[in-house]
Image (cartoon, helix red, strand yellow):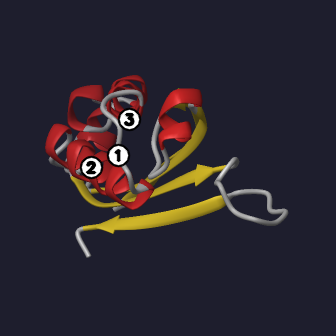
Amino acid sequence: MYTIRIMNCAFFARHGVFEAEETLGQRFYVDAVLDVDPGDALENDSIEGTVDYGTAFEVIEAIVTGRRRFLIESLALEVAKALAARFPQIVRAAITIRKPNAPVRGILDYVEVTIVWPN
């Protein structure tokens, strides 16, 4: 087993409960921590048997910049499931999504959720 970390991917999107969040949009940040079964990919130096970082980024981007979600928790779960479906060698995906401009009365850096798939 080994771990791939794809960290701090930034996307502009329109997720959230409030209509203003859909209208204005904002930047979201995504971390993907992927535990991968290497099979024989490492021994054979084979990209086909592992997780292609560029393709994984594209999967994340398509979901985050796609249709609106009310919950970033739902968004993170969808990213985790999509990565695991695209790369069957992923045995565990921990997806973290940060929302720096969460509509909270108060000062904060960001709201962050992490979903682990499978649980």
In three-dimensional space, the C-alpha distance between marks 1 and 2, rounded to whole angstroms, equals: 10 Å
Frontmost of labels 1 and 2 is: 1
Please name the residue that numbered disc 1 is placed on: 69
Say above or below: 96 vs 115: above
Please name the residue that numbered disc 3 is placed on: 60
In three-dimensional space, the C-alpha distance between marks 2 and 3, rounded to whole angstroms, equals: 9 Å
In three-dimensional space, the C-alpha distance between marks 1 and 3, rounded to whole angstroms, equals: 14 Å
Judge whether residue 74 can be spotted in this image: yes
Residue 24 horizontal/vertical position (percent): 59, 29
- Residue at x-position 27% and y-position 34%: 44
Say above or below: 78 vs 25: below
Residue 35 horizontal/vertical position (percent): 36, 59
Please name the residue that numbered disc 2 is placed on: 78
User: Could you tell me which quadrant the C terminus lies in?
Assistant: bottom left
The numbered mark at residue 37 is none
Do residues under tags 2 and 3 come within 8 Å of each other at their CB atoms? no
